[in-house]
Image (cartoon, rainbow, N blue to C red):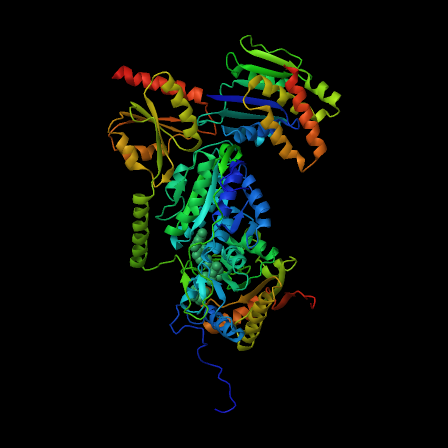
Amino acid sequence: MKKNEKVLLRGSEAIGEAALRAGCRCYFGYPITPQNELPEYMARRMAELPGTVFLQSESELAGINMVYGASATGTRVMTSSSSPGVSLMQEGISYLAACEFPSVIVNIVRGGPGLGNIAPAQSDYFQATRGGGHGDYRCIVLAPAYLQEAVDLTYRAFDLADEYRIPVILIGDGMMGQMMEPVVLPEFRKDLPAKEWAITGAGKGPSRFVRSLLLDVHVEEAHNWKLYRKYQRIERREPQSESYATEDADMVVVAYGTAARIAKGAVRRLRDKGMKVGLFRPITLWPFPSKAVARLAESVGKFLVFEMSMGQMVEDVKLALNGKAEVELYGRPGGVVVTPVELSRILSRRYNAMQHEA
Amino acid sequence: MKGMKKVIGRPKYLKEVPNHYCPGCGHSIIHRLLAEVIEELDIRDRAICIPPCGCAVLAYYYIDVDMVEAAHGRGTAVATGMKRCLPDRVVFTYQGDGDLAAIGTAELIHSANRGESITTIFVNNGVYGMTGGQMAPTTMVGQKTTTTPKGRNSVTDGPPLKMCEFLSPLDGTAFLARTSVHSPKHIQKTKKAIRQAFQTQMNDEGFSMVEILSQCPSNWKLSSVDSCRWIEEGMIPQFPLGVVKQRQTEPS
Amino acid sequence: MIHKAIIAGFGGQGILMMGVTLANAAMREDKQVTYLPTYGAEVRGGTANCTVSVGDEEIASPIASNPDYLVVMNAPSLHKFQSILRKGGHCLVNTSLVHEKSIRQDVKVYEIAASEMAEELGDLRAANMIVLGSFLKISSMVKPETVLEIVDETFRRKSPEVMERNKEALWAGYRFFE
Ligand SMILES: Cc1ncc(C[n+]2csc(CCOP(=O)(O)OP(=O)(O)O)c2C)c(N)n1
Ligand code: SF4
Ligand SMILES: [Mg+2]
């Protein structure tokens, strides 16, 4: 492959290849649809790459703990799964957060709760953005909408994970995993950051340990403060979003990932008909781009949150706007993927109702 | 005195701090043995211990090697991740019976079956020590615990799990032994077994585990002396001691 | 402008391969493109379909709710998709396997007995390439030369023979609507 050459890749392959190029050396995971193409790709590719470890774990629980072990040694490591499997990983993610072990976790979200189905869904938003497991912690959550963005964010995820020593969750869905789009792949990372905290055997120096059991409440409190300050730093520095046709908009649709693509299609249709509708797309779900939304509220009176769930991100939008604008939800749970045509009908109805009231 | 070996005294790699274990607890003996073996094999620089969730969770305060604490039961999965990244280190888990044979059974079996080149120090005291003496998978039939006030009932609770025997048919297991620390003679045998287990790992022969019957006077509600007697009379008939499996590797 | 095509038929007819080839050609021509196959449980029913979107501006949704083109390789696909074809859209039908007519009066229908033609060429499996050739003619989504290039690259290493046969099939389908 030539440098900067476009290649047509499936979403799962794009994510896998970007991870390897980012210096990911270990993959642990357990099969679950609709993300099996990702571990399969890793198994194939890692067999060709010396010094890498691919291991199919006996469960997601084991997998995430293998990630924990590998990360403890300072190695760039990832796992992937889909909703039920990620539920099982929550214990491990909490420990990763507590011990500040960098890691990348891909969740190709499917319809739920329970076994649900394998259709595209966005019902794991709360789980991803609120920590998900026990304790007071956060993970950085990245939500690409395009495959080039999936490549770029996967690549970046490993840097973020190392920089902040934090688990990073990349959220997608079956549609993103299966679809193909041209992407330009980044170069293989060569100089990875040194990790003086890694546990690799004491050598001649003093022995070290990493643990999350902090029985002294003041020590635990101090640790929580330290984590909190880190989270604040991330909230200041890392929010990312895209605004589309929002300059003169009277109504703005808020959507991420696959839903945002559908929404963009719908917004274009409405623009063609002369309706002043725009799109705001969070790229980082945590930290949520609250400031950017709030800024829009200076000129936009109405926000319509479109989610493939019965309303999870809508809470962050409301928190960000804090009453400054009207917020409405259009949620489609269960794995239903509405078409841009359907969505544009719904949007135009709400838009017209709003104009009518005004 | 001339010609006499120093037998008592702190091993080099046992840190000079008072430990939190109850008087007569097997954990403190096992810690000492580990420190001795690590010194004798000269592996302190490359040994990595994965302490459990259990009474031994604070092992990192006592044994002078690098450690990464694991969630309850996940030790062998964490060890797998570490060893795969650092194949030339000596990676061992330290786990209780609840940790290893209840909540962490799946991780254990699969790590053993994959023949992970790791060692597991399995401390079988027949109860959940840390949480206050509830039934463990290795509690004896009839033994009273806080969750089996009338004694373990083999019909409703199942019989005690014999982990060494359970793992021995697996191709990935190279060395499995059950020992005890209730008498000086048995303590020496335990040390030898730990040594063999580490050597198995260093020779890259496969998964190794030493199951150690260990006193928990506090939760057994017995004196130290009676605890040792309980191991001898109560536990050993159910958990026979000895090397359960030692895979003969072809001389290369 | 963005054009969307749904290609549908049985699994094993090379439906997805048609879509990927088309998408690759569009990429080669530096166009915006997305390819979206059906997957998972849906595939188990033995049907396969994919959506290819090609254009000169960013493609928002990879889904086609109102495709401009519909390529049907079997009867169930006609039933499933004909109603969403855009008014004035184009429907390419493999009449070897679809004996019914489209109920739509407001679309342009193209018929080709691709399986019979493929048999004449000596390889029944080449039917998908014949239809792809026809599609290139009626759609002008991408240039046939670019598709030939892609077919060349895809098959040359595997089997030069299959490559030649596929190219032949492609041209046969293309010329059919000249
Ligand atoms: C997921 C989870 N469940 C329960 C616990 C509580 N817990 C801590 S240690 C332990 C059992 C300890 O028993 P054992 O493994 O036999 O070790 P011992 O203390 O006897 O050495 C339990 C249930 C926990 N830490 N995590
Ligand atoms: S409770 Fe039992 S196992 Fe725990 S320290 Fe005390 S004696 Fe040892
Ligand atoms: Mg115990």
Residue drawn where x is 64% and y is 12% of the image: C100
Q: Residue placed farthest to the top in the image?
A: C105
Quadrant holding the C terminus of chain B: bottom right
Residue B190: horizontal and vertical position, in percent? 55, 72
Quadrant of residue C21 within the rendered picture? top right
Q: Is residue C75 above or below residue B2?
A: above
Is A345 on the left or on the right of A320, as rendered? right
Q: Is residue B222 above or below residue B185?
A: above
In terms of depth relative to the viewer, which is nearer, A317 or C161? C161
Please count the marks in the image: 0
Q: Residue placed farthest to the bottom in the image?
A: B2
The answer to whether residue A317 is seen in the rendering is yes
Residue drawn where x is 59% and y is 57% of the image: B112
Is B251 on the left or on the right of A86, as rendered? right
Is A34 on the left or on the right of A125, as rendered? right
Residue A98: horizontal and vertical position, in percent? 38, 53
The answer to whether residue B73 is seen in the rendering is no
In terms of depth relative to the viewer, which is nearer, A269 or A334? A269
In terms of depth relative to the viewer, which is nearer, A45 or C31? C31
Q: Is residue A132 above or below residue B239?
A: above
Quadrant of residue A340 within the rendered picture? top left
In terms of depth relative to the viewer, which is nearer, A169 or C33? C33
Quadrant of residue C135 within the rendered picture? top right
Residue B145: horizontal and vertical position, in percent? 47, 59
Residue A150: horizontal and vertical position, in percent? 46, 38
Residue drawn where x is 55% and y is 44% of the image: A39
